[in-house]
Image (tube, rainbow, N blue to C red):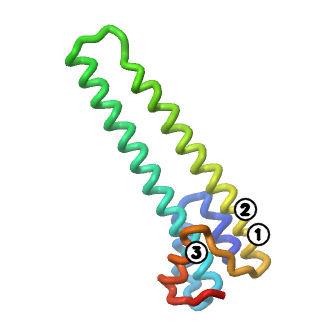
Amino acid sequence: MATLAHALQLLGFIPPLVIFLIRRQSRFVSFHALQSLLWCLAYLAVIFVVMFGGMLILFVTIATHIATKDAAPPLGLFAFLPLIWLVLIAGNIISIVLAIMYAIKAGNGEWADYPIFGKLARRILKMGPV
């Protein structure tokens, strides 16, 4: 189940959440599922912030363009759109790498910590270092 929690994180935060909730009696599965869940929620928050910022910049740019009656669209908008795509693609690549690496580690029975979320998961579950 711990391996599934990591592998299924590619489908979103719901599979790790379900595994975390139904396997609370196993500290090992809870630990891995919670790490996966925390990563998914953090990545979802990053996506939200990037998309909200992109939309805000888009609307401000369009409003400024209409107000000044410029003929050419502003270049700042075209510079920001590739940045949004780079952030999303980088996040997806990181998610795939984390899912594969930690699914393998969980399958081998390792108590492997995500770089940031491992300590947070241990604190939430009131676990000491293993």
Q: Which residue is depicted at the point 57% across and 50% down?
A: 91
Residue type highlighted by circle 3: Gly
Residue type highlighted by circle 1: Ile
The nearer-to-camera label among 3 and 1 is 3
Q: CA distance from mark 3 to mark 2?
A: 16 Å
Instruction: Residue 33 in the image: state x and y as whole percent.
Output: 59, 75
Q: Which residue is depicted at the point 47% across and 31% down?
A: 81
Q: Reply above or below: 119 against 86.
A: below
Q: Which residue is depicted at the point 52% across and 32% down?
A: 82
Total of numbered circles in the picture? 3
Q: Which residue is mark 3?
A: 118
The nearer-to-camera label among 3 and 2 is 3
**First of labels 3, 1 by sequence position:** 1
Instruction: Residue 111 in the image: state x and y as whole percent.
Output: 69, 81
Q: Reply above or below: 68 against 43.
A: above
**First of labels 3, 2 by sequence position:** 2
- Label 2: state its secondary structure: helix
Residue neighbourhood size for the residue with mark 1, other residues' Cα within 10 Å, grouped as few (<14), some (14–19), many (≥20)? some
Q: Reply above or below: 24 against 107.
A: below
Which label number is shown at residue 104? 1
Residue type highlighted by circle 2: Ile
Q: Residue furthest left?
A: 67
Q: CA distance from mark 3 to mark 1?
A: 16 Å
Instruction: Residue 8 in the image: state x and y as whole percent.
Output: 64, 64
Residue neighbourhood size for the residue with mark 2, other residues' Cα within 10 Å, grouped as few (<14), some (14–19), many (≥20)? some
Whether pointer 1 and pointer 2 mark residues with C-beta atoms closer than 8 Å, the reply is yes
Whether pointer 3 and pointer 1 mark residues with C-beta atoms closer than 8 Å, the reply is no
- Label 3: state its secondary structure: helix
Which label number is shown at residue 100? 2
